[in-house]
Image (cartoon, rainbow, N blue to C red):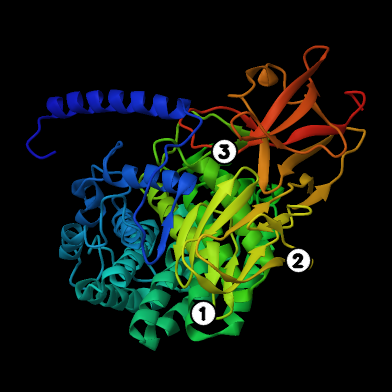
Amino acid sequence: MSGWSRREFLEATAVISAALASDARKVAARTELAEEVIAPIEGIAPAGELASRMALSGTRLTAKGVPAYSDEMVLADVRLDERRRFFNFSGDTSGRYVEALSVWPAQGRSQTSMDHLVSEVLANQRGDGRFGRTDLAFTAEQIGNEHMALLWGNGRMLVGLMARYGATKDPAALAAARKLADFLLAVRETTKAPEVEKRLEGQGAFGFICFTQLTEGLAMLGRATGDRRYYSAAAEIMPLLPPRGVQHAHGYVTTLRGGLMLAEATNDPKMLEHVKQLWDELAGSSDYVVDGSVLEYFGWGDAKNIALLTGAKAASGELPRNEGCGLADVIRLALQLYRMTGELAYLEQAERCYLNAFAHNQFATGDFGSRVWFAEGFTPTPSVDRAWWCCTLHGYRAYKDVMESAIRVDEDGATVQLFEDIDWHRGAGLRMRKRGSGISIEFVEPFAGSLRIRMPEWSAATKVERNGRAVSYEPGPYAYVGRKFARGERVEVKFNYRTKFVVSDGPRFAAGTIAAKPQRAAIYCGPYLMAADEELDPYFFSEPWPRNVVSVRQGAAGSGDATGHLRFKVNYTHDGFVGTLQTELRPMGEKPANDQRTLAIWLNVKGDGEARG
């Protein structure tokens, strides 16, 4: 933008914004995502809907959108350019940008395409190793919100530099990471002082989690260098993570992810158990949401936290909302736990969040951000949070973990774990595609090993065929399909989605049953959380609608509509007039949405019979 007058800049912005708004309306109107082809990285490549969603966000990061990810915009937080929001979180946006496009370059880019940008980042590193303000003295008496903002951004920069080094083996990135870590190690003693933690209580995104999240980058640096100083520092910081209370979820779960990296790198079973315990407690609390996610701030479900939520409400509004960063963290953490423990519950948690909360969070612009919850589900908001400064980047980053977890290949064979559109060439050549309520797997090269396919709990009597012939398999978490597959052989899996009713049971969600009397419940068809959507049926939401009663017959199941989309048909009576109507529920994460509309997740559900029980 250098050389432009303010008037020229505003005129150009108005033209670009109008064009993008037109494009966004066209995208929002589509019910299908355009098919995209994305080049493989390290033997894997997305296809189908997964590739289209990745391309949507990848294009946002590299080609279009407001604000555009120009070097000027990205570098603002290391150049301390006050014209950009959150410039004081030095290294946050710039570090995330380097990380995201290092682990998976956008379409038409390579892992070395950021050479110039990274050089500019490194040119802004200060003499003591930090990025950002040098006038901030890290003494126990002075450390406050601005210090935490700097630590947060520097932690994200450390992760970005390590991602860059992992992708390119750039020695300059590693040297800068070491220098940055030396600064972080130098200030940790005063930062961890009890009076500092006490002073930062209730500070949300400026809280003590800005310090504890350093575990991730330090664990990554220790693994890359073998220098145990970084492991020791991470191990020293990890126990300082405060109780959830009213905290920013992104920083809390990022700290847990760092603890898992540390546990894996150092083979520390105690650290693994510590992280498991903290996550299991979270997943069993009111901070865990019915769509498999967490809210941006913990504490909304506990009446004791009302006074403490003042800061959170000032930051994000009177109603609770989620955040793309936190959703990405839940997926990545749960996948890490599954990989390290083999416990299927964690894989199912990751899948639930990915297919529902995460998919719904993506906007048709390619951004991730926040969606606002209210008592019945999601509601429009006058301030739309397409969080280009963090969530758009962190959301895109999460796709790499999903792809790497879809299939596992070991010395015995291949195991399909997640059901995604993907081309796999890591020890086995497979092409997997979603087909309606099932998947199709084709061997694109001979494979001498075995094939196992996860049998999810959300499917009953799953059918498996090999080259058109039914495969008999023993009951259990995985179906053994056989060994020695020739090129061109196909395996078809047909799921039979279970219908599950989820009711709120104190802080937990429990499976419910259809009763004659209406009860507040959410409905899952297989892995998909179903919603009444204002786009499909605006009349359902005619005032007054929250006491509408949905009737579901025993044994009801979802089915595909004329275009193959999953739908769950129900009858309902409206609270404002007499008569029985029919509506369709759709998966909440069915498509990226640019428009804001009401989605009802929690419904008044009863069995067939009278509408008022």
Q: Amino acid at mark 3?
A: Glu
Q: Amino acid at mark 2?
A: Tyr
Name which of mark 1 and mark 3 comes first in the sequence: 1
Q: Answer yes or no: do the residues labelled 3 and 2 have beta carbons within 8 Å?
A: no
The residue nearer to you, when weighing 195 against 352, is 352
Q: Please provide percent x and percent y for residue 380.
A: 54, 29
Visible residue check, residue 248: no
Q: How many marks?
A: 3
The residue nearer to you, when weighing 56 against 323, is 56
Q: Quadrant of the C terminus?
A: top right
**In the rendered image of this protein, does residue 29 appear above or below residue 274?**
above
Left or right relative to 543: residue 443: left
Helix, strand or loop under label 1:
helix
Residue at left 67%, top 70%?
343
Occupied quadrant, residue 344: bottom right
Q: CA distance from mark 1 to mark 3?
A: 35 Å
Occupied quadrant, residue 68: top left
Q: Amino acid at mark 1?
A: Glu
Q: Which residue is mark 3?
A: 590
Q: Please provide percent x and percent y for residue 593.
A: 49, 33
Visible residue check, residue 439: yes
Name which of mark 3 and mark 2 comes first in the sequence: 2
Q: Answer yes or no: do the residues labelled 1 and 2 have beta carbons within 8 Å?
A: no
The residue nearer to you, when weighing 491 against 231, is 491
Front of the two marks 1 and 2: 2
Occupied quadrant, residue 225: bottom left
Outermost residue on the left side: it is 3
Point out which mark residue 473 bears. 2
Helix, strand or loop under label 2:
loop
